[in-house]
Amino acid sequence: MLYLYEGSLDVPTILKEWYEAEATSNYGAFIPFVGTVRDEEGIEGLSFDIYEPILNSWFEAWAQKAKERGAIIKMAHSRGDVMNHESSYIAAVFSPKRRVALEFIEEFVEDFKASAPIWKYDLIGGKRVYALDRSTAMQGSGILGAKG
Amino acid sequence: MLYLYEGSLDVPTILKEWYEAEATSNYGAFIPFVGTVRDEEGIEGLSFDIYEPILNSWFEAWAQKAKERGAIIKMAHSRGDVMNHESSYIAAVFSPKRRVALEFIEEFVEDFKASAPIWKYDLIGGKRVYALDRSTAMQGSGILGAKG
Amino acid sequence: MVTVEFLGPIQKQPLRLEITNLNQLASILQQDEELAKWLGNSAVAVNDTLVSSLDTQLKSGDKISLLPPVCGG
Amino acid sequence: MVTVEFLGPIQKQPLRLEITNLNQLASILQQDEELAKWLGNSAVAVNDTLVSSLDTQLKSGDKISLLPPVCGG
């Protein structure tokens, strides 16, 4: 399941809800990954744009991969502004055994960073500044730049 | 920090406490690993013995490794009986960046399984049956069995 | 008629164009100086599916999206 | 005099022995049929530090622990 929120995430409540929702599903391992905004380089926070149609299909493909390995994934992400020390991202895997969960959370988070259609901005002096230097061109990028 | 509890862990409360304790420590990544007892092979639950002096020194060595990488670790484990679908283990890493956290949680959990002085028993018909087949001999095991 | 939309940090209003493939779109967008810095690093989706070839055919009503470099989390 | 304790599933009361190294302990414990199945897969700690050699010297008051195969989590 994929959950999008306006502003920062209430991490304890989300983790509690996810844990309790699978309390009797017989998964032996539960690994959440929580991303929190770091106070660095003078930013006040971060801000996010999300393109939901492609995020949904990207997430569905991962949900299917999880299913094939007997696991499930859940993800929460913020839209808009998230201030320093607040959290903007939670991904979690549940699986019967620990190995699948440990491998899956890593693969999922790394692909999320490279492929999820989400754009990040630094909040500086109340303005959004696109974080180009920390962003990754999606696979297949640049085809429109090739001279015909 | 290492926390030992009698019986099952209150996972939502522990995760909330750990998350809030580091809320302003400026860690960008927080990854807990939660282990839950699976209902399988007719067991009613698991039971654990812990040898605390060596667990403490093993944990301290990992806390030092974490510190060298700018991270911190926390761990909670149950003593005694933990019934099916209850949780007995939480390990968590906080680090500035995601890569260290993803690598560290995996290394830590795998070494925990191989090295932490904790013994597991299946609860079957109310009795403790040592889970020898799922247990791992600690490094250096067997020296007393060698014929002199 | 197809619609072209620009996502995230690309500050540009949607376009409506009479084109039948992405080669034509490339030719048109390459004339737009504002877009020069985005074409080389943006991915392209047709009807919300990412595509990897300029030979992709378009039909009336299609929605084309430009997705600049991403950074979730 | 040293103390030998048996941890986890090894159901045996502590021993008190007059020995000065682990070689002597091995010889004594190998005569105990109950322990036969544990000696080959248990680790040994002296004063709560794991040791890897039978040549480890012991002094009066030392605590020796046998740690059978583990499985936390």
Image (cartoon, coloured by chain):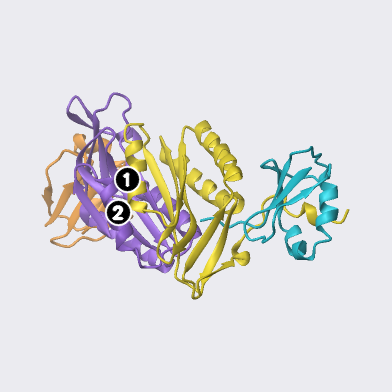
Chain colours: A purple, B yellow, C orange, D cyan
**Residue position for label 1:** B16
Q: Is residue A148 visible?
A: no
The residue nearer to you, when weighing A56 against A89, is A89
| Residue D37 occupies quadrant | bottom right
**Residue position for label 2:** A16
Q: How many labels does the image show?
A: 2
SS category of the residue bearing label 1:
helix
What amino acid type is highlighted by mark number 2?
Lys
The image shows residue A145, relative to residue C46, as above or below, that is: above
Crowding around mark 2 (Cα neighbors within 10 Å: few <14, some 14 to 19, many 20+) is: some
Horizontal and vertical percent position of residue D32: 80, 62
The image shows residue A92, relative to residue B1, as above or below, that is: below
Horizontal and vertical percent position of residue C5: 16, 48
At 53% from the left edge and 46% from the top edge, which residue is drawn?
A: B108
Answer left or right for D42 relative to B74: right
The image shows residue A135, relative to residue B140, as above or below, that is: above
